[in-house]
Image: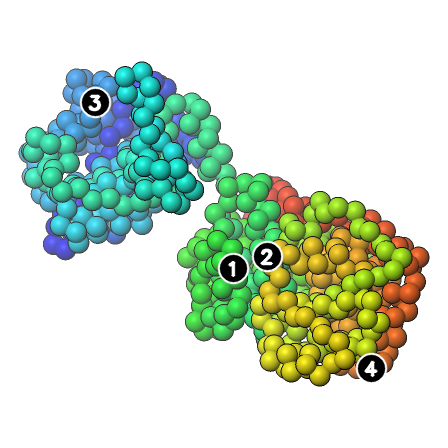
């Protein structure tokens, strides 16, 4: 009962008279088309009873097997193509009332709209009751430039041209959910006088009319639900967030994936960055592992992508029982507490000479970069350098930007020095004060965004940290001098420097400013070495790691599970 009212769902489902014979029981995925609607109705908190009205005994049998009531078959005259479903619904309501059923609210669910869920049904019923409407219908919003025919010519339905978001919305009934009060059944009008609406997304409102629609529905059914577990802030850096956004964009380019992010409220900068990128974010207010697991279970992803500094054993063990494909984005395999006991995909930018588990994909070709670093023009390596770029990631927690600025303040005036501060940079005031004291002005660019690739490409040399920026400049062909920010970076960069794209000086806190200045002057004065570093970088990283990682994720998801993997789930 909803607010003391009895809600009955009516599901019309014809048999062999559809344009596609027995469309309603044709298999979509692993079950009949009709079953998708019946499952949503059964999961609704608002619906008290689910009744299928059909003219066909075969359809009735399928409906009963899926838990619906089929107390009667509708007459032949109500099985033909009708201009409105209202006579069909009215017949069902009156037959149920003859048998003693009390009905206060009727919910009509068309079987040909398989992707609406229980939440959509509940939202429509809630709006009907809260808004005092006679009827509430589910609609799909349309802001395209629509026209209609009038006397042999097209007449616009829009007042003025403009961007989609500037157009007044038109609403199209999608047949997913209609909730109406019992009195409307006996009224002469279709929906009564006061009609409300609930907007569903295009997938939820997708309707199957014919075989082409059915083919599209099969494709939509295969699109994965993807959840990213990631954080980013001035405390932990922003590299993980940018990496996750890159692979999220790649996944959306390959599929129509339903993508969301699960993030901690403690790291506000990361939440804001992901939200601005247009992705849904679930924010967790505490740091308890079980709270995150509850959100993961609630979202029920088919693919869970972790992009965290470290992953411990208990978390991985819990994920192994959720039935999702687990993907761990790591810098090195050492970032994982364990690798051998849990089925998972591991994507690392570092190769590993040791024996690695099945599902490990490593090396610079899997460097997951943003789209700005792909398809850039060929790097010009100048004989006479003109620009040094300082870039220490999204947060630069140790303030290495200040150290580098002090070291290069006396650099030859013919070479410009420009610093870039990420969104979580906490030393802006200190940098402004320092800049006023230096013998040269070093401008600070705040949050360069997509322009960072252009700056890196223009620079003759980047001085930065050992995060993802070493792969970004490699893809662009820009040489680098690198300072490590922590012990993990130190280990990685000592190995990565052997690739020949950067010069690694050691931990930034331990490198003297004079040593940094000398290294920069030496490299700027050696164009042949810079050319070699540039060529090596472009050969090493092509910028398509995000697409490769996305393809790996989708391929592993589609691969049949081994008996051992199935047993773990």
Q: Position of residue 476 (x, y in %)?
A: 76, 53
Residue beneath label 4, please?
Answer: 512
Identify whether 256 is placed above or below 538: above
Q: Earlier in the sequence, mark 4 or mark 1?
A: 1
Q: At 27% across and 17% down in the image, what residue appears? A: 151
- Give left or right: position of 26 versus 55: right
What crowding class fits label 1: few (fewer than 14 Cα within 10 Å), some (14-19), or many (20 or more)? many
- Distance between mark 2 and mark 3 Cα atoms: 49 Å
Q: Earlier in the sequence, mark 3 or mark 4?
A: 3
- Distance between mark 3 and mark 4 Cα atoms: 82 Å
For marks 3 and 1, give the one nearer the viewer.
Answer: 1
Q: Which mark is residue 244?
A: 2
Residue beneath label 3, please?
Answer: 83
Q: CB of mark 2 within 8 Å of CB of mark 1?
A: yes
Residue beneath label 1, please?
Answer: 274
- Distance between mark 4 and mark 1 Cα atoms: 37 Å
What crowding class fits label 3: few (fewer than 14 Cα within 10 Å), some (14-19), or many (20 or more)? few
Q: Position of residue 173 (x, y in %)?
A: 28, 35
Based on the displayed image, in which of its 4 quarters is residue 320 positioned? bottom right
Q: CB of mark 3 within 8 Å of CB of mark 1?
A: no
Total marks drawn? 4
Q: Earlier in the sequence, mark 3 or mark 1?
A: 3
Q: Is residue 444 visible?
A: yes
What crowding class fits label 2: few (fewer than 14 Cα within 10 Å), some (14-19), or many (20 or more)? many
Q: Earlier in the sequence, mark 2 or mark 1?
A: 2
Based on the displayed image, in which of its 4 quarters is residue 19 positioned? top left
- Give left or right: position of 504 versus 242: right
């Amino acid at each position: 009962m909803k607010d003391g009212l009895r809600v009955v769902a009516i599901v019309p489902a014809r048999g062999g008279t559809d344009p596609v014979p027995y469309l309603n029981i044709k298999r979509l995925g692993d079950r009949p088309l009709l079953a998708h609607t019946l499952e949503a109705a059964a999961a609704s908190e608002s619906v008290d009873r689910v009744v299928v009205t059909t003219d066909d005994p075969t359809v009735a049998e399928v409906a009963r097997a899926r838990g619906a009531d089929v107390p009667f078959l509708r007459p032949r005259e109500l099985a033909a193509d009708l201009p409105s479903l209202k006579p069909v619904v009215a017949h069902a309501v009156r037959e149920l009332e003859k048998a003693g059923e009390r009905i206060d609210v009727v919910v009509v669910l068309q079987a040909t709209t398989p992707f609406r869920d229980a939440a959509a049904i509940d939202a429509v019923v809630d709006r009907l009751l809260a808004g005092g409407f006679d009827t509430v219908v589910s609609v799909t919003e349309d802001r395209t430039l629509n026209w209609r025919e009038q006397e042999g010519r097209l007449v616009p339905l829009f007042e003025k041209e403009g961007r989609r978001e500037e157009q007044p919305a038109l609403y199209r009934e999608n047949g997913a959910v209609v909730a109406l009060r019992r009195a409307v059944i006996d009224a002469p009008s279709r929906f009564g006088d006061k009609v409300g609406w609930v907007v569903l997304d295009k997938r939820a409102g997708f309707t199957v009319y014919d075989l082409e629609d059915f083919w599209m529905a099969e494709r939509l059914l295969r699109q994965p639900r993807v959840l990213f577990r990631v954080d980013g802030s001035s405390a932990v850096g922003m590299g993980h967030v940018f990496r996750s956004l890159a692979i999220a964009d790649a996944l959306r380019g390959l599929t129509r994936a339903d993508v969301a992010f699960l993030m901690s409220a403690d790291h506000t900068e990361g939440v804001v960055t992901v939200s601005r990128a247009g992705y849904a974010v679930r924010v967790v207010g505490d740091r308890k592992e079980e709270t995150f697991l509850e959100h993961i279970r609630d979202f029920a992803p088919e693919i869970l992508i972790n992009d965290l500094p470290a992953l411990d054993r208990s978390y991985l063990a819990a994920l192994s029982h959720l039935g999702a494909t687990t993907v761990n984005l790591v810098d090195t395999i050492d970032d994982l507490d364990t690798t051998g006991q849990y089925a998972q995909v591991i994507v690392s930018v570092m190769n590993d000479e040791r024996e690695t588990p099945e599902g490990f994909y490593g090396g610079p070709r899997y460097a997951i970069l943003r789209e700005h670093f792909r398809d850039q023009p060929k790097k010009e390596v100048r004989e006479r350098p003109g620009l040094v770029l300082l870039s220490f990631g999204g947060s630069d927690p140790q303030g290495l930007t200040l150290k580098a600025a002090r070291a290069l303040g006396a650099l030859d005036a013919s070479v410009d020095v420009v610093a870039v501060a990420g969104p979580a940079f906490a030393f802006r005031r200190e940098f402004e004060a320092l800049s006023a004291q230096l013998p040269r002005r070093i401008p600070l660019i705040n949050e360069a965004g997509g322009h960072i690739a252009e700056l890196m490409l223009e620079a003759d040399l980047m001085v930065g940290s050992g995060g993802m920026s070493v792969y970004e400049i490699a893809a662009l062909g820009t040489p680098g001098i690198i300072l490590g920010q922590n012990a993990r970076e130190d280990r990685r960069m000592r190995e990565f420097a052997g690739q020949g794209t950067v010069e690694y000086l050691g931990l930034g806190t331990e490198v003297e400013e004079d040593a940094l200045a000398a290294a920069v002057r030496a490299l700027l004065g050696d164009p042949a070495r810079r050319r070699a570093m540039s060529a090596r970088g472009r050969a090493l990283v092509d910028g398509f790691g995000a697409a490769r990682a996305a393809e790996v994720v989708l391929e592993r998801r589609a691969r049949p599970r081994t008996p051992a993997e199935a047993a773990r789930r």
